Amino acid sequence: MLLLLFAVQDIRAQGTGYRRKHLEYYDDKPIHYGILFAVPFTRFNVRHNSDFLQKDSAYVIQSPTQASFRMGFTVNAFLTEHFDLRTTPSVSLYERQVKFSYPNGADRIEKRESTWIEVPLLLKYKSLRRVNSRMYMVAGVTLGIETNVKRARGGSTSRLDTKSSDFSIDYGVGYEQFFEFFKFAPELRFSHGLTNMLQPSKNSVGSGINRLSTHTVTLYLNFE
């Protein structure tokens, strides 16, 4: 009877199959490098003046979400079994808009098309690795610098102007899948700007706006 029990357990063990552990000594290296491609969905958070209906002829001021593009590279430094220090310097192509709606049914859209260099500093918490996969979370801050802006034709000064630097709080979640020669990690990250991007002295529109701050949700594809 005992031999029969051992035989059944052996058959079950053989039936589970063997899963090869790729990049088995990946975490033994102190620093890893990689590349990333990302699709940010970005907009301005608009805060109105308390009396904006008297200051601005528009009755609705909002910022629609716009899809953008980002690419960069990754530097990941090992700290402990569960924590890493991480940065993902990147270049982003943004188009953020502010839409003004008027009582007569007309709309006006002010655009800010520009290229940004963004350098985040993130703390990464990772779960225990399960063969070839694991989950992780990241949180930290990002400094963004605007490098160039697509100016309105004819040198128009009626466009909405914003600051050329930003500072944001970031957090997100990701999933790592190990393959034979590389690691692939899709990640969803949220970014909330702390800087008031509005420059009232340089704007002849948007008198009903008190504050503009950035808000971005980004889907990352990381390869390390």
Image: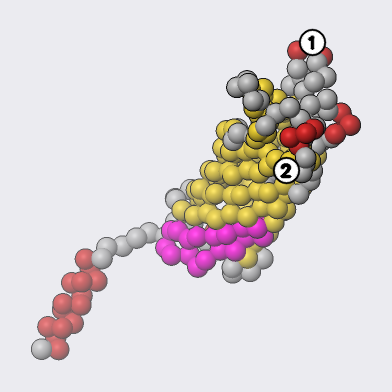
Residue at image mark 1:
154
Residue 68, given in percent of the width and then of the height, sits at 60, 32
For label 2, the SS is strand
Residue 142, given in percent of the width and then of the height, sits at 73, 49
For residue 36, what is the image quadrant? top right
Q: Is residue 124 above or below residue 198?
A: below
> In the image, which residues are magenta?
120-139
Residue 142 is inside the magenta segment? no
Residue 15, given in percent of the width and then of the height, sits at 21, 66
- Way the structure is coloured: secondary structure
Q: CA distance from mark 2 to mark 1?
A: 30 Å
What crowding class fits label 1: few (fewer than 14 Cα within 10 Å), some (14-19), or many (20 or more)? few
Marking on residue 101: none
Helix, strand or loop: magenta stretch: strand
Q: Is residue 105 visible?
A: yes
User: What's under tag 2, amino acid-wise?
Assistant: Arg
Marking on residue 47: 2
Residue 153, given in percent of the width and then of the height, sits at 75, 13
In primary-sequence order, the first of circles 2 and 1 is 2
